[in-house]
Each structure stands twice: as C-alpha cells, then as structure tokens.
Amino acid sequence: MSELAAILDPLTPLLGEWVTDADTPMGRVRCTRQFAPAVGSAYIELIAHWAFGAGRDYEERALFGAVKPHTLGFWSFTSDGGHAHGEIADVHDIHPTALGFIAAMPAGRARQAYWRDDNGVLHWIVEAETPNGWERFTAHQYRRTAPP
C-alpha cells in the first residue's frame, strides 16, 4: 500500500452516500453526506447537503488528505462562506473505533468524529471545547443510500 493510500485508508468505511433525518435548533433537516475519491484519488471528497425546507439549504465541501507527511487532515468550505481545516485526533473517548478530527474555529476548538456500528449505521458527532471538556452539539445517525 502506498503512503497516500495508507493515510486515506481510515476513511474507507465512510465511502458512499449516507442520509439522515434529524431535529435541529433550526427545525427538521434531511442531511446527505457523500464521500468519494477525488483529484486522482489523492483525496477523499465530502459533499454534505443540509435541506431544512422552504429553500433553506446549506452545503459543505471538504477534502480529506495528507496535511503533512503521515498526517490525515481536512479542508472544509461551507455555503455561508465559512471554512475550516484540521487534523486527525484521538477520539477514542467518544467511541473505540471513531475516526476524529480537531479544528480551530472562529469560536474556538471543535472536534468531529465518525464511526460505524455493528448494524452499518454511520454516526457523526460534533463537539466544542469548553473549560469543562468537550460539549456535544450535533449527533446524527446515517443510513447508507448508495454503495461506494
């Protein structure tokens, strides 16, 4: 396995398209997440689409890849003009098989984590760092809609 393939390998379980319907402070949302190889398979691209209804949509595009030698990271851009970048982080306190990333955001540090359970459900959470530790503010469970 090449060094690049080894760096991207932890993302393999996420490949394909996933969907969830969830409650949010902005109301009910249908969110799809599609992970696919991109740029000659040097990266994994995430296209996330949040549909809140009545034309209130939100989109994220992210690339996961090597941010420095032997280090997986991401660059994210959102339809509201936001952007973030971060690196892989140990998130085993969330779940033993979770793949996580930490990013410096305008409001402080945040982390996200992905893991699949024994039923094939994809879990995604986002937490903000507070003086008392990590505080979760988003938790979704996705089902696969399209294979990789």
Image (spheres, helix red, strand yellow):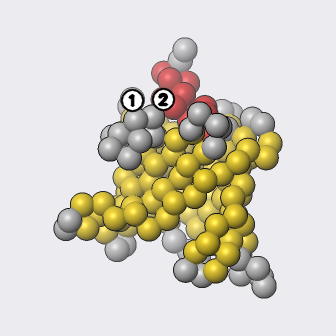
Q: Secondary structure at mark 2?
A: helix
Q: Secondary structure at mark 1?
A: loop
Residue type pointed to by label 1: His
* Mark sitting on residue 7: 2
Q: Quadrant of the C terminus?
A: top right
Residue 87 appearing in the image: no
Q: Find out whether the residues at labels 1 and 2 contact each other: C-beta distance under 8 Å.
A: yes
Label 1 sits on residue: 70
Instruction: Residue at the far front: name it.
Output: 119
Question: Where does residue 116 sit, x and y in percent of width and height?
Answer: 57, 39
Question: Where does residue 62 sit, x and y in percent of width and height?
Answer: 58, 54
Measure the C-alpha gap from mark 1 to mark 2.
6 Å
At x 55%, y 49%, the residue is: 123
Residue type pointed to by label 2: Ile
In the image shown, does 31 or 62 lie closer to the viewer? 31
Question: Where does residue 86 sit, x and y in percent of width and height?
Answer: 40, 52
In the image shown, does 81 or 36 lie closer to the viewer? 36
Question: Where does residue 113 sit, x and y in percent of width and height?
Answer: 46, 49
The correct choice, above or below, for 24 with respect to 112 in the image is: below
The correct choice, above or below, for 29 with respect to 9 in the image is: below
In the image shown, does 67 or 7 lie closer to the viewer? 7
Residue count near mark 2 (Cα–Cα under 10 Å), binned few <14, some 14–19, many ≥20 = many
* Mark sitting on residue 10: none
Q: Is residue 46 left or right of residue 10?
A: right
The correct choice, above or below, for 82 with respect to 61 in the image is: below
Q: Is residue 1 left or right of residue 103?
A: right
